[in-house]
Amino acid sequence: MSLGYATAERSKLWLTKVPAITATFWVIKVLSTTIGETFSDYLAVNAGLGTAVTDAVMAVVLAGALVIQFRTRKYTPWIYWLCVVLVSIVGTEITDFFTDTLGVSLYVSTAVFAAILAVVFVVWHRQENTLAITSIDTPRREGFYWAAILTTFALGTAAGDLATEALSLGFRNGVLIFGGLIVATWIAYQAGAGQVLTFWIAYVLTRPLGASMGDFLTQAKEFGGLALGASATSVLFFAVILVLVAREQMLVVRHGVAVKGGGPAGGYRADRAWAGAALAVVAAVGWVLGATHTAASEEGVATVADQPAVTTGGTTGTKAGPHPVTRLGDLTSFAVITSDVQRKVARDDLAGGRTRVKDLEVAWDDAEAGLKPRDPAKWHQLDDQIDAVLSALRAGHPSRSDCASTLATLLGTFNRFDGV
C-alpha cells in the first residue's frame, strides 16, 4: 500500500468531533441555553459572586473544558455538551458586559456580533474550503467551529434582547417569534436551502428561543409567565439534559462514533423518539409544577398585596392612587423590601440592612425579564438606583448617611413609578 493511499484511507476514517445534527441535538441545545443563563445569574446574584467574579470564573472554566475537548480524538458527548453550556454562559456574559457595563446599544452590539460571525465564516472558508458541520475533524477546523459557536451565542443574546427588551416584544412573543423563525428555517431546508446556511441560522435563533422559553417558565404570572421559578426550571432542564447526554455517551461507547457525514448511533427513529419524550417530560412536569404553584397561591400564601403601603419615610400609610408615569406595573413588593432595609439603616443596623437588601437584589433580578420590556428606560433608572443602594451597603466602611440617602431616593422612585 502506498503512503498516499494510506493517507487517503486514514482521512476517510477521521472521526468528527461534534454530534450528528438530530432532533436530540436541538432539544439539548435549547435546554442548555436556558441552563447557561439561569446558572450564570445564580452565581452572580444568589451566590453573591457578582458579575465580574462570575465572568472571570466562567471564562477560566470554559478555557479548561475546551482544552479537554481539543485533546479528545473523537466526539465525546459529556465534554462537548459541557463546553456548549459554558459557551452559552460566557457568550451571554459578553453581550451583557457590552450592554450593561459599557452601555453599548443593543442595535450596535447585534450588528457588531453579526459582522464578527461573518468574518469567522469567511476566514474559515478561505482556510478550509468548507463550512460543513460534518467535517469538524481537525484542530484548526474545530477552532473555527468553537469561535463561531461563541459568536452565535453572543449574537443570539444581543438579537434576543433587542427583540424582547429594546423593541418591548416580551418573552411570550419571543417564544412565538423565534420558534416560528426556526420552523421557517427548517421548511427552507426541506425545500432545498443549503444545510450549512440553515444550520447556523437555526443555531443563532435557538439562543433567544431558549432564553424566552426559560423566562416564560420562570417569570411570575403577573408578568405573563408560569411562575415555576428559576431553580425548579433549571433542575428540570438539567435532569432532561443529563438523561439525553448519558444516552449519547452510552451509544458512543457501545457503537463508536460515526465517520464524517454519518448519522447518530442508534438511528434517527430512536433519536426522534427520545427527543419527543424529553419535550413531553418538560411539558408534563412544568404543568404539574405550575398547577401546584397555583393551588398554593389560592390556599392563602401571603402576597405583597397583603403588605402595608410604604412612603418615602419608611413608615406605613395609605397607598396613593395609580402613577401612570411608567408601564412597569405593581412595584409594591420591591418597595416593601426597600422600606424594611430603610428601617434597619435608621436603627443603625447596617449589617441587618445588608442582609435584607440581598432579597431586593434577588427579587429584582428574578423579575427582570418581565419588567424590563414594559419600560426599559425606567427599568434602567431603577436598576441604577438599586446598584447604588447595594454599593452603599456593601462598602468596606459603609456610611449610614449614604445608605439612607440612596434608599430614600430608591423608595421615592418606586412609589412614583408604581403603576398599580
Image (cartoon, rainbow, N blue to C red):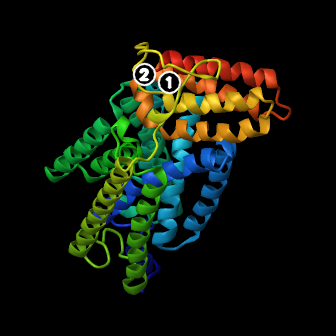
129 or 414, which is in the foreground? 414
Q: Amino acid at mark 2?
A: Asp
CA gap, disc 1 to disc 2?
6 Å
Looking at the picture, how far across and down is residue 136, in whole percent?
A: 43, 62
Looking at the picture, how far across and down is residue 84, in whole percent?
A: 48, 57
Residue that appears at 31% across and 60% down: 288
Where's the C terminus, which quadrant?
Answer: top left
303 or 281, which is in the foreground? 303
Residue that appears at 41% across and 34% down: 370
Direction left: furthest residue: 191
287 or 206, which is in the foreground? 287
**Could you tell whether 340 is left or right of 231 in the image?**
right
Direction right: furthest residue: 397
Up the image or down, 213 lies above or below 4; here it is above
Q: Amino acid at mark 1?
A: Trp
Up the image or down, 41 lies above or below 409; here it is below
Residue 289 in sight: yes
262 or 110, which is in the foreground? 110
Looking at the picture, how far across and down is residue 254, in whole percent?
A: 39, 86
Residue that appears at 43% across and 52% down: 33
Q: Report the label total.
A: 2
Residue 75 in sight: no
Question: Could you tell me which secondary element the residue under label 1 belongs to?
Answer: helix
Please give the residue where the numbered disc 1 appears in the rendered image. 379
Where's the N terminus, which quadrant?
Answer: bottom left
Please give the residue where the numbered disc 2 appears in the rendered image. 375
Question: Could you tell me which secondary element the residue under label 2 belongs to?
Answer: loop
Query: Are the residues flagged by discs 1 and 2 in contact, CB closer than 8 Å?
Result: yes
Q: Name the image quarter holding residue 50.
A: top right
Q: Which mark is residue 231?
A: none
